[in-house]
Image: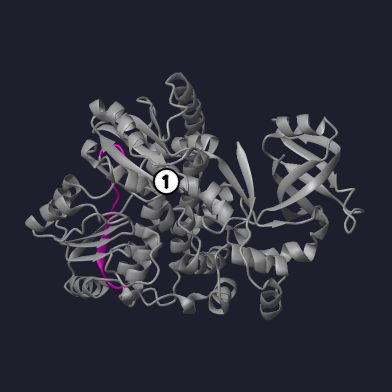
Amino acid sequence: MEKWVVSAKKADFRAISEKFGIDPVIARIIRNRDVVGDDAIDEFLNGSIADLHDPMLFKDMDKAVRVLKKKIAEKKRIRVIGDYDIDGIMSSFILKTGFAELGADVDIKIPDRITDGYGINANLIRQAAEDGIDTIVTCDNGISAGEQIRIAKELGLTVVVTDHHEVLTIPDAADAVVDPKQKDCPYPFKELCGAAVAWKLILAMGGDREKKLLQFAAFATVGDVVDLTGENRILVKEGLKQLRKTENPGLRALAEACGIDITTLDAYRIGFVLGPCMNASGRLDTALRACSLLEATDGADAAKLARELKELNDSRKALTEKGVEDALAYVIDNDILHDKVYVIYLPELHESLAGIVAGRVREKYNHPTFVLTKSEDGVKGSGRSIDAYRMFDGLVGVAHLLKKFGGHPMAAGLTLPPENVEVFRKEINEQCTLEKEEFVQKIVIDVPMPIGYVTEDFVTQMDVLAPYGKANPRPVFAQKGVVFSNVRILGANRNVLKARLSVPGDRMYGGVSVDGIAFRRVDELMERIGTGEPLSIVYYPQINEYMGRRTIQIVINSFL
């Protein structure tokens, strides 16, 4: 079930258009992204590395810099402890590379998803002490590890926390805590990913003078699905420029293994092609394999590692499809379709796939979804949410049932005893205050715009809105009265529809017809076309290049 709504935010679009040299429709889309005022619009369109905030604005950054510079000067051994996802992998690589350039004796330890679980733990701390490590630096974790850090201090270790997750209680035993989400942290932008925080630490220490590590923070920013607004937008925009000409053999090899021309790399290909390959190492193997790819200096070694990561991701895809099938069956078989928050317990699912499966169920039903699996530590799970539900806050309300948890408003992880699964489902639903209408999938239309308005120049102008992602989605438009002709079904799985689109009743653009293509709900669309009635469509335009010929193509997102 869908509800179409037109974004109706007000501004003088003509004046914005003239001032910044953009189409009035582009000006309206920028306003729809809540970018207001000349300075904000200028940053959105023209923001550069020079506009990034001073890393010394972080709370405790001065402490972290002072401690780490002293340790490096004294040749103390430093260990970076990251996480097994894209953000943790990139954070670890950034810190190790940056510290090494500053002269540090540094190594990386990334927890094993199955045996260690998320983040720093007592075993990793004791291992560090046994290995002669003096200082631990966390990245993309550590903000909820107060007890573990106390153990580290008892063992005589120095601990610097860098993280970006929500803060319940600050780990006071740490020597420094750098996390923009601390309530008293004056850093102006709060939505950085862990890798960006790690990069800021390296900059604050005087490292990465040429800012070449920015590309890895950008990759993580896309992969961790944080808001692509403000500073994150600049990081990704500038980072993509570096990535398209990267000298990193591992990234080049991974792009080649996935059939991607790295010179045209965009946020979509990071998020849906390269990123999942990096993540697959931490899901089905060890994330150190992905770190090894980034550290590879030999082209042949990089190519081998890249092929292995792609193969792992192919295996992950097959396991995911089976997990999604089981999860959707669980929703029906266990009569939870009318719950506000879906809690799905699949004991045999590989725990690394819980978050992906939860996301796919959330996409289908538009309900916050937790997928739980059996683990060595009881029951572990991951959740994916909808805009109306702050998932981390929901877990805070049932914290007494959980061994540990953490995350964001839109995603979270948790561990609980097996006997608490059913009561967890019951209580998190009882505490959820969402109303029925908040579960209706809402499609926000930027502009009701005739398909005849779309020109090659307009589509090219839309490039100023990229990179697209969370909080800056690809713009969508709407058109009534669309007639389909020359309809064809394409693809090996016959899941692509191509047609000519026209709007006969449109006085200004009635003579225009353009190619249209649809990748979803194809059977349903064919059935509607068969009635002969004109349809309303939600779409976005693109340029289709084929054998040197460029034509406008309308991609159909939805229809009524």
Q: Residues within 10 Å of mark 1 (few under 14, many from 20)?
A: many
**How many numbered marks appear?**
1
Q: Position of residue 116 (x, y in %)?
A: 25, 41
Residue 496 vertical position relative to residue 94 in the rendered view, above or below = above
Q: What type is the residue that disc 1 sits on?
A: Tyr
Quadrant in the picture for residue 94: bottom left
The N terminus sits in image quarter: top right
Q: What secondary structure do most residues of the magenta stretch adopt?
A: loop
**In the figure, is residue 214 to the left or right of 515?**
left
Magenta stretch contains residue 430: no
Q: Residue at x 34, y 64 (%)?
A: 198
Residue at (89% x, 49% y) in the render: 505
Q: Residue 531's spot in the image, x, y percent?
A: 83, 30
Is residue 280 visible in the rendered image? The answer is: yes
Which residue does the numbered mark 1 point to in the structure image? 389
Find the magenta span and give its range: 102-115
Q: Helix, strand or loop at disc 1? A: loop
> In percent of the image, x 42 and y 46: which residue is there?
389
Q: Is residue 70 above or below residue 339?
A: below
* Front residue of 232 and 434: 434
The correct choice, above or below, for 64 with respect to 106 in the image is below
